[in-house]
Amino acid sequence: MSPKPAEQRTERLLNLVIALLSSRRGFTKAELFEEIELYSEAASPEAREKLFDRDKAFLREQGIPVESYGEDPLYEQDNSLQRYRIRSEEYRLPEVSFTPAESAVLALAAQMWEQAALGSAAARALRKLRARGVLAEDAASSPVHPAIRTSDPNFAKVFRAVTDRTPISFGYRASAGEESTRSVQPWGMGSRYGHWYLVGWDTGRNAERWFRLSRMTTAVQAGRGNYSVPPDFDIHASLASLDHVFAPRSAAVDVQSGAGAELRLRAGGDADPAAGLAEPAAGWDRLWFAVTDLESLAADAAALGTAARAVHPPELRDAVSEALDRAQKFQAEPVPEYVPAAAARGTAAKTAGAQERLSRLLDLVPYILANQGAGMAETADRFGISQEQLASDLNLLFVSGPRYYPNGLMDVNFETGDIYIDNAENLSQPVRLSMDEAAALVVGLDTLAALPGAAPTDAVASAHAKLTEAAGTAAAAGTSLAAELLPAGTPPDLLTELQQAVTGARSLTIRYVVPSRDEVSERVVDPRRIFSDNNTWYLDAWCHRAQAGRFFRVDRILSATDSGKAATGLPQPDAQFPSSLFTPGESDEFVTIRLLPDASWVADAYHAEKRAPLPDGGQAVVLRTASTGWIPGFIARLRGSAAVLEPAALRDETAAWLSAAAANYA
């Protein structure tokens, strides 16, 4: 059976790297075509030239410094006489050592991206740093586990445009509701208020502008051209300026007495006497807010259905009315045909592309050289792949190397289940960090530094300095990206008290808002860990009432009181960030929901059991839930981008719920 094109490409790229590292003088293209047999399979000389140019560009994109030069200055423009090489000192990650404390914060910084678009880059960076003494397990000792999620479908394209300085264009829906096509020169991107923003120069408006990724209505298209980022641009300062660009506004929502427990947590703005509002009806309470994002408050009000009425300003009332109207119309559409399939689980099911596999192969050699005799199972687990995939990787390494120098081939042996590699000097050191790998760790450390109590500040600072020096120019990518994970709306002393309870093994009595039942409950818990999902923070604790581990949103905890020493011998959580915020139970129900493309994030955020593509580009997903009472409000919150398909009774119930809620604004 002939190799697949993807495997051939990986083999060709690997041989190209080995060849270019093997000679200080380098090779001409003609010599490389002789040395690397796979180039002979091109359909024509012109196709072979294009293939080489693509390979060369691909390696440079991955941070591998392919250098070209002409030996004779009289013929510098003659491409046929150009020589190509990779200088080993530019290729290899510089020698740098990390203390145990620095190792712990680096591992924690990498772990933050596990559920995000830069998760693969962070994992690759950590793999390379293992050769410098960093151990991923060191992150487990921290009581605080921040995590960044980047569910916006355009995140990866925008990040690449920022780091490559590529102009882009996209459809965009402004906060006022109007849609237009925007052309932007990206300067940086970052999270603020729980949303990701692109900052750049809007060429159509000739001004600096901010764009929320979740409001992009089309796929991002890359353009052409060159531009420069202002030398005084600072992504952190630019994001902070959003506080002035979007000044807080007074807003009011009337809520039925005894309802809206979660919404009441965020109330506290001053009443606007100029609003000229009549007093709320009997049995209703008026809540005032100071908000920078009316759209978010509109979603919260819509999710309460008949129990809430947005009353001020008129734009807020209109936004809630529009959200309910769109949700009602989408819910009424006929059920499309679909056949849900089980969602893929784990890393072994993924098909690795050329980038991922080449990076893994280049990391695998120095890892084995530093751990001769490593077991297949342990190594596969370390690299997040199956043992079958690892065997395939090792077999590829065995046949890779110079064509005419058999003694130059690597000697790979894993027949006994233990792996040994010899004669691999050129690949013995880890590759220098690429732009996205450096950015993932640098931004992770920056984020940790801004989180009180998350990590020792001296270890974060020293690890940051060492990493920046080792990454070289690639570390500059970190200055264009910022992530804010401060728990908005949570009193700092509450977060501190929770951290102290984790480290001191203390029990707490908490008063907690349960949105699905719209009530406040009281329970005794033994805190085990604090973690985040973007800027939403959770307490992982053993609940004495449920006699099981439970997750509690920190911003829904009304109070926490010390209740003495925590119980001993209770089950401990997994060391890694939880794969799901939902704990399955025997009485769970299954709900099938239709999602439009702009709501595709729901499938990942709520860990869909099954998925099915739909003709409109959306999908039907099966969600598992302990109860369905929250589903109609959830559909309303998604303002016409989601609808219940099954079960039929819940579909009818949701339609009636939306109709009654819309009547508030008739």
Image (cartoon, rainbow, N blue to C red):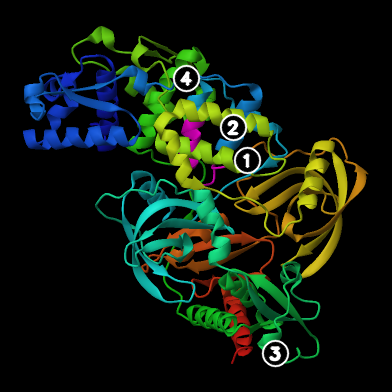
Label 4 CA crowd tier, 10 Å (few <14, some 14–19, many 20+): many
The residue located at (32%, 37%) in the rendering is: 61
Q: CA distance from mark 4 to mark 3?
A: 69 Å
192 drawn magenta: no
Amino acid of disc 4: Tyr
Image point (46%, 35%), residue name: 438
Magenta region, residue range: 112-126
**Mark whose residue sits in front, 2 or 3:** 3
Please name the residue that numbered disc 1 is placed on. Answer: 448
The relative height of residue 370 versus residue 292 in the rendered view (above or below) is above
Quadrant of the drawing holding the C terminus: bottom right
Q: Residues within 10 Å of mark 3 (few under 14, many from 20)?
A: few
Quadrant of the rendered structure where residue 592 is? bottom right
Instruction: Estimate how packed mark 2 is, as few (under 14), some (14 to 19) or many (20 or more) residues with alpha carbons within 10 Å.
Output: many
Residue 27 lies in what quarter of the image?
top left
Which residue was labeled with disc 4? 367
The residue type indicated by label 1 comes to Leu
Q: Earlier in the sequence, mark 2 or mark 3?
A: 2
Counting from the top left corner in percent of width and height, residue 399 is at 29, 19
Expressed as whole percent of the image width and height from the top left, the position of residue 194 reads 58, 58
Q: Check if residue 119 falls in the magenta segment.
A: yes
Residue closest to the eye, 525 or 310? 310
Q: Which mark is residue 277?
A: 3
| Residue 542 in the image, given as x and y percentages of width and height | 80, 46
Dot 2 falls on a residue whose secondary structure is helix
Q: Is residue 613 visible?
A: yes
Picture coordinates of residue 607, whole percent (x, y): 56, 54
Which numbered disc covers residue 107?
Answer: 2
